[in-house]
Image (cartoon, grey):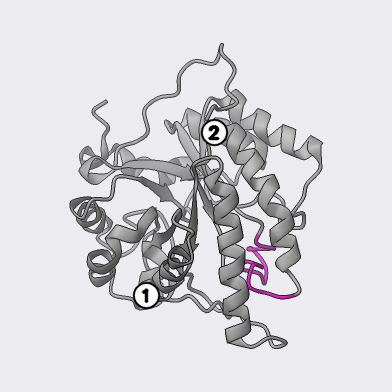
Amino acid sequence: MTTNQPSGTPAAPAAPAAPAGLRYLANCSMLFTELPLLERPQAARDAGFDTIELWWPWPEQPVPGDREVEELVRAVGDAGVRLAGLNFFAGDLAGPDCGVLSIPSGVKQFRDNIDVAVGIGERLGVSAFNALYGNRVSDSTPAEQDALGRESIIAAAHAADGIGATVLVEAVSGPKPYPLRTAADAVTVVDDVRAAGAHNVGFLLDLFHLANNGDDLDSAVTAYADRVAHVQVADWPGRGEPGSGRLDLDRHLEALADHGYTGWVGLEYTPTTSTAESLTWLTAPAHQTSH
């Protein structure tokens, strides 16, 4: 798989180091929001990141126009960073939505989006696609939505497998009627679709969301580390940068590494100050990169 990085672009700096040899990447949908989206990949690189992730950039467009896609690909490539993670179309995450793949009235948008998202992923080096499950709706039963959701995830996994990528299933917190609340909820879906042949589906372990839902983080890491395919962090309470709340994030990341996790750790938090100031914790001795 190749990335769209001009040959004259200098190599990006090494990714900031996380505990136990893990590496941080920047979620450019929540960080650097002082800037327009297309300027954020460069801002991330300037801040020391060589890798980023994004929510689906067009919340009202499961199939954006060619011009919009080319602008995104160019912005990432010109910045010299890799887009390692990308959400499939999930509706308006900043508004009422939290995925559409299990919603009868929205599933066509998800299916139409799969090839577009995977096509972008192939060009930019995406290794993981987040498939947000969708809220419960009144015009369908939970059983009907769960069957539809599993069918959608399997379809996405088959497409992602063509570029060697993984599809992620995430537990989410907050007031929306999103049914996957605990690690066990999300892993049940992962196990079901794997049993149906979708081997490249994994658990997105978001430490903030699990803590916000009252899940036991230590138990989740111990029980499900072998299914974890991506990790995201924010402190709790508040969803701010590490150090702004009460979670011992380093301890949980070290436990994940001890259980064999070697993947990325996405910084998906809401800065309590400017993004640049919110990243100063990375310069603390425990987080300084040695490479």
Q: Position of residue 213 (x, y in %)?
A: 40, 77
The residue that disc 1 covers is: 184
Magenta span of residues: 90-104
**Residue type, label 1:** Ala
Label 2 crowding class (10 Å Cα cut-off): few <14, some 14-19, many 20+? Answer: some
Q: Main secondary structure of the magenta part?
A: loop
Q: Name the foreground residue: 9 vs 3.
A: 3
Q: Is residue 145 magenta?
A: no
Q: Is residue 100 magenta?
A: yes
Quadrant of image for the C terminus: top left
Q: Position of residue 14 (x, y in %)?
A: 36, 28
Label 1 crowding class (10 Å Cα cut-off): few <14, some 14-19, many 20+? Answer: some
Name the residue located 51 percent from the left edge and 33 percent from the top edge: 82
**Number of callouts:** 2
Residue that protrudes farthest toward the left in the picture: 258
* Element carrying mark 1: helix
Query: Which callout, 1 or 2, points to the residue nearer the camera?
Result: 1
Q: Position of residue 57 (x, y in %)?
A: 67, 48
Name the residue located 63 percent from the left edge and 34 percent from the top edge: 39
> In the rendered image, is residue 251 in sight?
yes
The disc at residue 43 is: 2
Could you give the CA–CA distance between mark 1 and mark 2, rounded to whole angstroms? 36 Å
- CB-based contact (under 8 Å), mark 1 and mark 2: no
Image: 265 above or below 99:
above
> In the rendered image, is residue 134 in sight?
no
Q: Position of residue 117 (x, y in %)?
A: 65, 47
Q: Is residue 204 left or right of residue 141?
A: left
